[in-house]
Image (cartoon, rainbow, N blue to C red):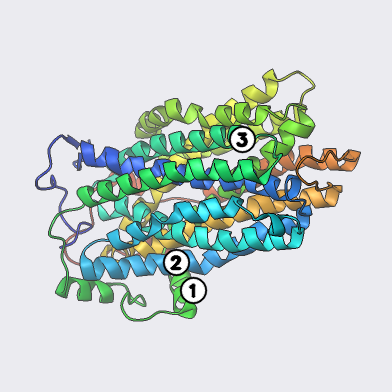
Amino acid sequence: MNAAARPEVPLPGQQGREAGEDGGAVPRPALVRYALGSAGMGVYVTVPGLLLLYFLTDTLGVAPWLAGLALLVPKAVDIVLHPFVGSLSDRERARRGNRLRLLAAGCALAPAFVALFAVPAPVADRPWAAAVWVAGWFVVANALFASYQVPYLATPTDMTVGYHGRTRVLSFRMVVLTVGILVGGALAPLLAGEGDSVARYAVMALVLGVFTAVFQVVGVGGVRDLLPAGAPRGARGARGARGARGAVPTGRRGPGATLAEVRDVLRRNAPFRLLTLAYLLASTTTHLILAGLPYYTRHALHRPGFTTVLMAAFVAPALLTTPLWFRVSRRWGKQRCLLLAQAVFVAGALGLCAGDAAGPAVPVLCTLVLGVCFAGLQLFPFSMVPDAVREAGRSEIERTGAYTGVWTAAESMGAAAGPYLYSAVLALGGYAAARAGEEVAQTTGAHTAILLGFTVLPALLMAGSLAVQLRYRLDAQAARSPGPPPAQGRRKAPGRGRA
């Protein structure tokens, strides 16, 4: 049997276990090492989202519409890339008993991350060439990140902890992810300065790239220790390959087969489909906030150096509130907590419309509110994905990587759509791009676009996510059945009934 099918018993050869209240057992040292892998992931999901659009428009002089495309097109590749990596990780697990080779390959992310900002002078002098450079290396970096992220996030489903146990594992990850986001979000603007040179951005990427690589390697060790030794291969792998109808994780697969599996996953599992759509909108919202933050602090607050302050205010609350969200969810359930986080996020985003009219206190307070909500927006959707997969039955567990690939593809699409939407608003408002060291006066229309794109648009997007999430019905059912699926037979896939 594989990890997903084993009864929930302590893993052999491990000390310092912590038993979950629903019967699962998780070795504490391995859990910590696993969670530490999120520190590097936090840097990568934050820094490009926070600075790459601003780097293109206000250091390389790329027009907003072109800068948006340079970020959108590489992420469009992820629609196929992430599900393909997910299916590849399922085949790896079926053949080798784990997904570690893909994780190790993803540890090569750091050099591509550095190249993303280290634009050579002859290229930087030509905005079109600079946009192509950034887009090309963004594709490479995203592919390496997917190689790490997809198998890494499959781990909680591969484990055999129940409903609350999965939230607990993800809460550890969320705390460390927050540290990575905070490190990237706070240090990157400080190291890059006011965008006065490409060299400063390159130094920033080098420092944070080393940080990312170190913690990625630690995370690989954590994943290895969380999963049972002597994992099955051979015959079980062949059975797993045939376990999911229409999903054969062996042999060669092209883009067509990958997209077919994406359709099959979304068609067969309605709760997962709703979660994915709601999270796509939420991810678009949070990445729009990241992309617009440097513009908001410079033009709406007239405090360029305030980017670090607001970024810290957005991320730091998660360090304290993630454990609180977990405790509240034990009483209320994940769904209610997620809906609360979404609703309050809408109010906080609208509060940022005040700009600097009341001084810096109101924007800081509203950003702190958004940060508290951000913790819930990250914790609960990620912990609900394993619930949706496990409730679908054993055959769906056999292709956990495919589910994770679809999920991370949605997250990646949100990471692209957020900056692109904001760049489109800037272009409609007439925002003028500038080269490093240049000062360009922005029109009234540009200032209006900067403000509304950072406040009203995120509020509308998150309201849409809330409306979709209201249709999710699996949470109460998953809470009543925290254990793994039965050893024999198969549950009716929830995608065939009501979500």
Q: Which quadrant is the C terminus positioned in?
A: bottom left
Q: Quadrant of the N terminus?
A: bottom left
Q: CA distance from mark 2 to mark 3?
A: 33 Å
Task: Give the mark nearest the N terminus, 3 or 1.
Answer: 3
* Residue drawn at x 60%, y 51% as measured from the top left: 118
> As shown in the figure, which amino acid type bears the numbered disc 3?
Pro
Count every numbered label the image shows and give the total.
3
Question: Residue tagged by mark 2?
Answer: 83
Q: Which mark is residue 259?
A: 1
**Tag 2: Cα neighbours inside 10 Å, few (<14), some, or many (≥20)?**
many
Element class at badge 1? helix
Kind of residue indicated by mark 2:
Pro
Q: Is residue 245 visible?
A: yes
Is label 2 or label 3 in front? Answer: 3
Examine the rendered structure and indicate whether residue 362 appears above or below residue 224.
above
Q: Is residue 362 above or below residue 417?
A: above
SS at badge 2: helix
> Few, some or many C-alpha atoms within 10 Å of disc 3 (few <14, some 14-19, many ≥20)?
many
Q: Position of residue 454 (x, y in %)?
A: 71, 39
Of circles 3 and 1, the one toward us is 3
Q: CA distance from mark 3 to mark 1?
A: 38 Å
Q: Could you tell me which residue is drawn at 28 percent across and 37 percent down?
A: 32
- In percent of width and height, residue 18 lies at 19, 35
